[in-house]
Structure formats: C-alpha cells, structure tokens
C-alpha cells in the first residue's frame, strides 16, 4: 500500500488543430476512440480508480463529450498548454498525480510502481522508460539518448513539493520541444546541449541540471514496463492498445 495519496489529474485537452487518431476514427477527440466497446479515457479512469495511491480524480478538458465519458470525475478547465494546465490545477490542489487521457495501457500496478519510486524529498517526479524495456514494434517513441542509456517518457508525473507550481510554470517554456531532445537540451542551456550531443550526460546529471534551472527538486522514476511508454498518438498506437486489451490485458475495475 502506497502511503501517500494523490489527486489524479488526467490531461484531455487538444494538441494542435488536427489529431491523426481523431481524424482516422471520425471523432471529435482521441480520448473518445472506442477500445473494447468503451472510450479510451474510460480505461485510464478505471486504472486510477483501482489504484490505492489515488484519492480523487480530475479531468482537464474543454470537450463536452469527453466530460460525459469521464462521468464521476471532477471536470476542471484547461489552460494554454498541458504544463500550464498543471500549474493552474496546483493553485488549488497541491499534490497531483498527472497522466493523459490517451494512456490506454495504464494499470493500477503501473501507477503503484511509479508512486512507490517517487523519492521523499522532491517537487516533481517524472516517469521514464528505458529503451531496454520497450520492444520493437509499429509504434514510435521519442528517446533521449543519455550516457547510461536511452529513455522515453512514461506520461506519469507527481507534483507535491513547495516549488512544484513554479517548476510547472518553468516547464511551460520547455514542452514545445518535448519531441526534439536536442532542442530541449539547448533550451536548458548550451553546456547541457554539448554534453547531450557528446553523450556525456547521464539520467541523474540530466535531472540535476533540470532541477537547477527550474529551482526545484525534479527526480526521475525509472519504470521497466513497456506499457508505461504507450500513449495513443497515432492510429498504429490505437491498434496496439486495442490488440493488447482484446487479448485479455484488463485493469482491475473498482467495485
């Protein structure tokens, strides 16, 4: 049992004018894509409700249909970007577990593993998945090539320290480069860019530099689970999630 309990914030806003998944499915928002006869976001909410680390759930969305599919969760407004939405939520809820509405293979076990790995003294914890845990397949992930291995995002974040809101605001300036590791390193600083380019920056050093720039304690949580790396950005990702769930990969439902 995880001692600390969080309010979960599910990000369900739009990125850009068009979304390839929504377009291919003929729907208004990819969170409504049908997986096993249910909207994608319903699987995410099931996982959160079944996790002992989660006390309450909020969904940030501007879509009425998504809000309807998230029945039982508290609907909160979105801001100009995901990081800005988190910063806004932290104004009223100081302890957040953040994920996304397209994290279709999220499970209670994955949530508990992430929360168990969060260090005691931190402002933000960031889930990352090493390349060794991610099997090759039809989906593509953005990997950060570090001295001790390659890592991609797990779309799981914990915010709880006194400087977490300020750090989330700092993150607003970085998230535009989230899919371009070189430009992201350059935004943190020229020395960081050089060390990244030469592969002389390991995971611990990268987060130490990020913490220094953000004036907050930001820690990685390594998850050796390929499911943590799957978010539904493309029709191929959606097909993978459907195949996994139809094959019997089900999260435990809350009673």
Image (cartoon, rainbow, N blue to C red):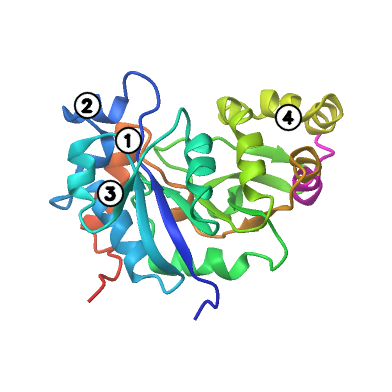
Among all residues in the image, which is located at the extreme left? 37
Gap in Å between the C-alphas at discs 3 and 2? 17 Å
Viewer-nearest residue: 37 or 149: 37
User: What x and y, as percent, mark residue 101?
Assistant: 34, 45
Q: How many marks?
A: 4
Q: Which residue is mark 4?
A: 185
Q: Which residue is mark 3?
A: 41
In the rendered image, the quadrant that contains the C terminus is: bottom left
Label 1 neighbourhood size at 10 Å, few (<14), some (14-19), many (20+)?
some
- What residue is at 79 percent from the left and 46 percent from the top? 202
Pointer 4 with pointer 1, Cβ within 8 A: no
State whether residue 12 is above or below residue 20: below
Q: First in sequence: mark 1 or mark 2?
A: 2
Gap in Å between the C-alphas at discs 4 and 2? 33 Å
Gap in Å between the C-alphas at discs 1 and 2? 10 Å
User: What x and y, as percent, mark residue 153?
Assistant: 55, 44
Q: Which residues are magenta?
A: 199-208
Q: First in sequence: mark 4 or mark 1?
A: 4
What label sits on residue 236 in the rendered view? Answer: 1
Residue 151: quadrant of the picture: top right
Q: First in sequence: mark 3 or mark 2?
A: 2
Viewer-nearest residue: 152 or 177: 177
What label sits on residue 24 in the rendered view? Answer: 2
- What residue is at 50 percent from the left and 59 percent from the top? 225
Where disc 2 sits, the SS reads helix
Q: First in sequence: mark 3 or mark 4?
A: 3
Q: First in sequence: mark 4 or mark 2?
A: 2
Where disc 4 sits, the SS reads helix
Q: First in sequence: mark 3 or mark 1?
A: 3
Gap in Å between the C-alphas at discs 3 and 4? 32 Å
């Amino acid at each position: 049992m995880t001692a600390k309990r969080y309010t979960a914030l599910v990000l369900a806003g739009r990125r850009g004018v068009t979304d390839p998944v929504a377009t291919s499915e003929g729907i208004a928002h990819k969170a409504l894509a049908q997986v096993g006869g249910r909207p994608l976001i319903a699987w995410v909410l099931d996982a959160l409700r079944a996790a002992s680390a989660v006390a309450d759930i909020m969904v940030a969305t501007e879509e009425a249909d998504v809000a309807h599919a998230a029945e039982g969760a508290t609907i909160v407004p979105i801001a100009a970007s995901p990081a800005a939405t988190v910063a806004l939520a932290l104004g009223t809820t100081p302890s957040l577990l953040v994920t996304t509405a397209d994290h279709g293979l999220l499970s209670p076990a994955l949530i508990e593993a992430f929360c168990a790995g969060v260090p005691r003294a931190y402002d933000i914890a960031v889930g990352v998945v090493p390349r060794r845990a991610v099997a090759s397949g039809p989906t593509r992930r953005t990997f950060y090539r570090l001295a001790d291995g390659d890592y991609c995002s797990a779309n799981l974040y914990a915010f709880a320290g006194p400087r977490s809101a300020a750090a989330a605001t700092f993150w607003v300036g970085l998230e535009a480069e989230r899919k371009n590791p070189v430009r992201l390193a350059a935004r943190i600083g020229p020395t960081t860019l050089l060390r990244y380019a030469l592969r002389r920056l390991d995971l611990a050093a990268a987060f130490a530099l990020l913490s220094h720039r953000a004036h907050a304690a930001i820690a990685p949580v390594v998850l050796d689970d390929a499911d943590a790396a799957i978010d539904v950005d493309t029709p191929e990702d959606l097909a993978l999630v459907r195949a996994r769930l139809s094959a019997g990969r089900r999260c435990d439902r809350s009673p």
